[in-house]
Amino acid sequence: MPLGRPAREALTARAADIAAKRLTVHDEIRTDTWTRGSPALLSRMVENLLDNAIVHNEEGGWIRISTDHDTAGARLVLTTGGHVLDQERVDRLTQPFERLGADRTGPEGSCGLGLSIVAAIVTAHGGRLTLLARPEGGLCVTAALPSTAGPEAGKAAR
């Protein structure tokens, strides 16, 4: 499946939330980045990452979302600006119920499971999830997944 499809769908579905927070989106989604896996789970992965990027972003902030691939595989990279974060605390965010504190809490009903779900999805697809606190502030999240050659390879995997 093209990794850009769920990324584009998630952006479209969250356009009102992005506009309400006055976020600038740098869209670098490519249509030629293919991976194998469950469309439903890969969509959930992208949705959770984008939801976190919106909710935990500064008013008037920015989000960069990209998909790309090389010989090592396919990648979804989501980067945000914002406050400087402690890498040791960021490293724990894929653990269930982990959050960065009161200054980073989400809406009512959010319990800190989003990134643990993302990590489980990436692992189930044979990939690797990395979270990097950017020195200038914000976070860079990379979901590296196995890639396929495109639509023909995707059909063969079914």
Image (spheres, helix red, strand yellow):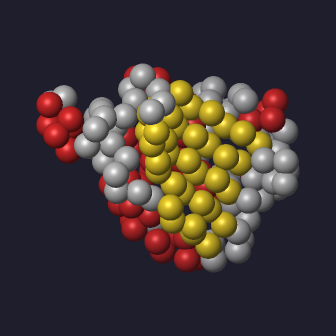
Q: Position of residue 17 (x, y in %)?
A: 52, 69
Q: Closer to the camera, 109 or 138?
A: 138
Regarding residue 3, the answer to whether it shows in the image is no
Residue 112 lies, in percent from the top left, at: 61, 38
Residue that appears at 31% across and 48% down = 2
Q: Quadrant of the N terminus?
A: top left
Q: Residue at x 68, y 57 (%)?
A: 80
For the C terminus, give its image quadrant.
Answer: top left
Query: Which residue corresponds to the image point at 44% horizontal and 63% vertical from the top-left?
Result: 11
Judge left or right: residue 28 versus residue 140: left
Residue sitting nearer the eye, 116 or 71: 71
Foreground pick, 156 / 21: 156
Left or right of 2 on screen, residue 26: right
Please identify the quarter of the rendering in which residue 133 is found: top right
Above or below for 42 versus 138 = above
**27 displayed left or right of 56:** left
Q: Residue at x 70, y 68 (%)?
A: 61
